[in-house]
Amino acid sequence: MRCKGCGYSLFNHRGRTCPECGAAFSPADFEFRANAVEFCCPGCMQPYYGTDARGLPEPRAFACVSCGAACDLGAMVLRPAPGVREDEAELNRVPWEDRSLPWRRRFLRTVGDAMVRPSRLGAAIACSQGGGSARFLLALTLVAAVPTALAAFAFGALLQMGAVPPGSTWSAASARNDLLAIALACAAGVAVAVAAVLAGVLAVAALATLVLRMAGVDAPWRRTWPTFAYTAAPLAVCAVPCVGPYCGVYVAGVWWLVAAGIALGSSCRASAGRAVAAVVIPAVVMLGLAASGLVLFVVMPATAAVKAATAAGAAAATAPDQGAPAADGEPERETAPVPEPETEPEPAPEDSP
Ligand SMILES: [Zn+2]
Ligand SMILES: [Zn+2]
């Protein structure tokens, strides 16, 4: 039970204003886990327990069984039950899972909690009963970034159009075709990007679960997956025009890992070191996979293509009487009167066509 204005702990406090900032409060403003808080008679400190859905005593006003004084919820002294930590007493709810709110408010509150209060979000996940689709929230976050991505893409396309060289056969008809192609490419790109990020977050969450379990932490998937999915909300930073598409993904990526680490600490009761390992190891593995994918599917084919082109050029140069060099990088061997060009490459004469 912390002051909603300044965060000061309000347990064991008789007054109804925050001693730190002076804001008024009432125990009825809070929700508690069942039997996690003792509501004490202000006269004799006889404890009572909260029994209703919000963890508050029912009825709210009664006569103390011990001293007979009038006990009213508004005047009672609250303290955590024996063995309950102060920060475990309150019933934190993931805003996204609170079906009583409209979806837009649920979404924005979850984004806010993920960005500035990941520890509280983690505590809420720890006692979550489900009720919201983490995957849907994540997809919504990514889709929020789509308009900006489209704008950046369209801006690039306009620059390309402005760079049409004079005298080219550029017309309204070809521009229409170009725009159609750009729109299709945009739609496909957005779909692929959303699917790729979803898969990436899933992979990181799975690896983190593995790391935590190997470190002896009780890390069920129903807690680790929402932790990563809900804290990925900073990816919505990519929706900020101009800045988002360029550095948003780096800022948001780091923000996400930091928030996920903090939230894991409270959602899975992991120590700081284990929580850090659970986000750093998957991140390094994923970066390594991305780098090897880049080498395997982009750098190596490109190198092979350059080599083939060079070989074709060399072959054409060694057989200048054969006319134009082969277009596809395969030297024309069946008519070449010269010795095998691959095994004994001759120095290229200077009179090539
Ligand atoms: Zn306060
Ligand atoms: Zn009493």
Image: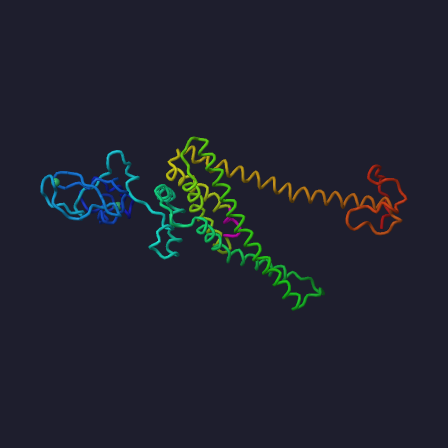
Which residue sits furthest bottom?
172
Task: Judge whether residue 246 is colored magenta.
Answer: yes
In-front residue for pair 177/35: 35
Q: Is residue 105 above or below residue 121?
A: below
Region of the chain picked out in magenta, as a range: 244-249
In-front residue for pair 9/288: 288
Q: Residue at x 54, y 48 (%)?
A: 196
203 horizontally vs 218: left or right: right
Q: Position of residue 12 (x, y in %)?
A: 21, 39
Q: Residue at x 64, y 41 (%)?
A: 296
In-front residue for pair 18/231: 231
Q: Is residue 114 above or below residue 147?
A: above
Q: Position of residue 222 (x, y in %)?
A: 41, 42
Which residue sits furthest left?
68
32 horizontally vs 239: left or right: left
Task: Judge whether residue 109 is colored magenta.
Answer: no
Majority secondary structure of the magenta segment?
helix
Q: Residue at x 86, y 51 (%)?
A: 323
Q: Position of residue 304 (x, y in %)?
A: 72, 43
132 horizontally vs 1: left or right: right
Q: Quadrant of the N terminus?
A: top left
In-front residue for pair 195/252: 195
Q: Quadrant of residue 185?
A: bottom right
How was the colour assigned to the protein in this rendering? rainbow
Q: Position of residue 80 (x, y in %)?
A: 24, 38
Quarter of the image where ligand 2 sits: top left
353 horizontally vs 226: left or right: right
